Image (cartoon, grey):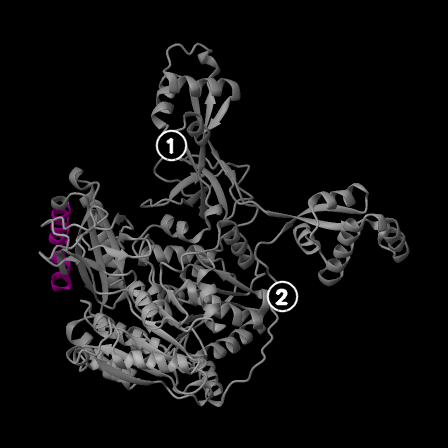
Amino acid sequence: MKFADVILPLALPKNYTYAIPETMADSLQPGSRIAVQLGKQKKYAGIVKAIHEQAPPYKTKPILDILDANPIVYPSQLAFWSWIASYYMCTEGEVLNAALPAHLKLSSETILLYNDAYGSDFSSLDDDEYLVAEALLIRKELRIEEVQLILDKSSVYSVIKKLIEKNVLLVYEELKEVYKEKKEKFVLLHEQYKEDAQLEALFNEMNKAPKQLELLLAYLHLQRTQGNVLQSELLKKSGASAAQLKGLVDKGILWIEKRTVDRVPGGAAVAEIDFDLSAAQTAALSAINESFKEKQVTLLHGVTSSGKTQIYVKLIEACLAEGKQVLYLLPEIGLTAQVTRRLKKHFGDSLGIYHSRFNNNERVEIWNKVKSREIKVILGARSSLLLPFKDLGLVILDEEHDASYKQQDPAPRYHARDAAIYYAAQFKAKVLLGSATPSLESYFNAQQGKYGLVTLSERFGGIEMPAIEIVDIKKEMAEKTMDGHFTSALKTAITDTIAAGKQVILFQNRRGYAPFLLCTTCGWIPHCKQCDVSLTYHRNQDKLTCHYCGTRYPYVHTCAACGAQTIEPKSFGTEKIEDDLQVLFPEARIARMDMDTVRNKDSHNRLIQLLEDKHVDILVGTQMVVKGLDFENVNLVGILSADNLLSFPDFRVHERAFQLMEQVSGRAGRKHGAGRVLIQASNTRHPVLHWVMAHDYKSMYDAEIAERHAFGYPPFVRLLKLTIRHKDQQTAEQAGHILASWLQPLLGSQLMGPAVPLVARVRNNYLQELLIKLPRDAKSIAQIKQRIQDYIIQLRTEKKFRTVAIIPDVDGV
């Protein structure tokens, strides 16, 4: 008897084992989807992890069906999933959920069947029960959504439950395949008109039907210029109606055929490289290739606008020539639009794009094309790391320092940079980390010789680094030369830049109009009812919004504490800056880039296109404007409040403030002469500002690494945060203290907490945090993680703590 260990798309503490029926024993393979039953009725599509003959210590259920003729997941992926689950302290089911496109994750759909044994006497049923029973008697089966329509209610489960108890209906679970192929209508010319003579005779006959003749001519033009002719394109080009097309079909001149088409194009990997590298780029490329001979991972530390992307293109070209696949990772979806246009030019349809804004059908098709190697180069955000690569040769992580590479919620809370290095090692693939401001961890590994290090210290084309000036906000406020949130120096610089036909980027790392409202009489601030945070005012919506749970509230005019009508917006976000700019520069074309303006699939791309086409004079935005965007006409960058970046309570605050300011500064003067950067600050003596002014990454690194070593922070230790979450504050506190008391003998001074985090309540759940410093020793880390997971299970055996959520976050602080 053979058995299969199956990964189900659920957060189960272990994988279940199912019996393999003899009829399936020869055709079942690891990596295939199968239909299995869990519990009494529910069915799921699981992934076979392993096949063996070891019977588990419980009665096994049989596999119901094999859903795939060939595996959809490779063994290397299954091993990768297992590593992610182990290292990031989650379940393989959670990894499967993150990896597989939604339309490949089948779960059962509830179907209600009429019980013929009940008869047709409905006198004992109430009105709602009668309506459902009558519909079932006629239709014999109904789905849940059909019952909701019949009763005109969203909640129908109480009615269904009563009908089950009265034996009126039976419940059946059916697995439902959601993915559908895309079909398009193509127009073809009948064979009898393929010869010129017959076609000429046809034209003569159709002189009396000018509209149909025009339609036919449009068809012939499209057919000769692009081959296949879509019905939708033909009607659009000819301006004809569907009825006129039907007339030609009825006459036997044209005919319509439905065909399956790809939502995502794929093609041969043909590289067309139409540029030459500079001497500095050529030297860097050579050094990278030399480094790859000895090291699996190499860090490319290249200043902003040094031409790192062109080096990436050359490396991709070489990898494709070897027949290998390439993964090019970017931290943000928004960056893919600009990089896509560049890579498409060089690699055409062999380039695939993958991120969360594709619909589920598109994701299935990309998944299949990567698995079949039809797509050789994938460009995407961190989720593209989970695609089914077969022969990965190169992984590029651009802007490798970016915090967006770390998944926050839900699990798996993996870091794409670290996970990519592990995954690439399975293929013996090379990894290139690129950044103008590398993370301290990556630069430390390079300094220690674990990674190779290549430095590119000059901008492409000999362009100078931008000149950076610090503008003293306190001084201008004292001299009363401030205009709102703009110093006179910044206002003058914006005026001069626009007058010169150049563009401006203004950076403020807070969205909305005002981060909070304040009663100027008593100091009351409106807070979210579900979270312990102040509400942000969004003037365009005239709403107060919680940026933690998303709840919106009406604007407050009267103070809830003292009753005074002295509520005023305080501080400022990107929306307020946009409003102020429209007053200060009424002739300027102003745009805003933040989470509120780029929610749609193509909105970010449209905004970038507007800036590239010089239809925007001033772009104001959050850190979205910082990350790797290349605008040749931007000559001025303004950072409106450096103090906000430098005052956050986090051991990484100086590193991240330097990275943000250096990166946004790098948007200036990338093509035509040196740019200019103005940084508004109150604390003008802060060391980070002077490192940014000098573009001095090394001094920042030396100062920060010394502090990290002195106080025991990464990269000298690994951090593990445990978040305890419960709706009752006392229960959360008790769970935190009990868990800490168990861990204290094991960890000693390595354990900090429990403590209340900065935001103590989110979505009506009270939080406690434990922070653990782990030694940089894989064996010790694994043992400590196992003990922690054992203690979590032990805590949950107590009835009081059964509903307490304990969330481990590895390397996430």
The residue identified by callout 1 is: 154
Disc 2 marks which amino acid? Ala
Q: Are marks 2 and 1 in contact (CB under 8 Å)?
A: no
Q: Secondary structure at mark 2?
A: loop
User: What is the magenta range?
Assistant: 732-751
Question: Which numbered marker is on residue 268?
Answer: 2
| Predominant secondary structure, magenta span | helix
Query: Residue at image x 24%, y 72%?
Result: 485
Q: Quadrant of residue 125?
A: top left
Q: Secondary structure at mark 1?
A: loop
Residue 533 shows in this picture: yes
Residue 7 coordinates in the image, percent (x, y): 41, 46
Disc 1 marks which amino acid? Ser
Judge whether 453 appears above or below 169 on screen. below
Query: Residue at image x 55%, y 37%?
Result: 23
Judge whether 133 appears above or below 808 on screen. above
276 displayed left or right of 244 = left
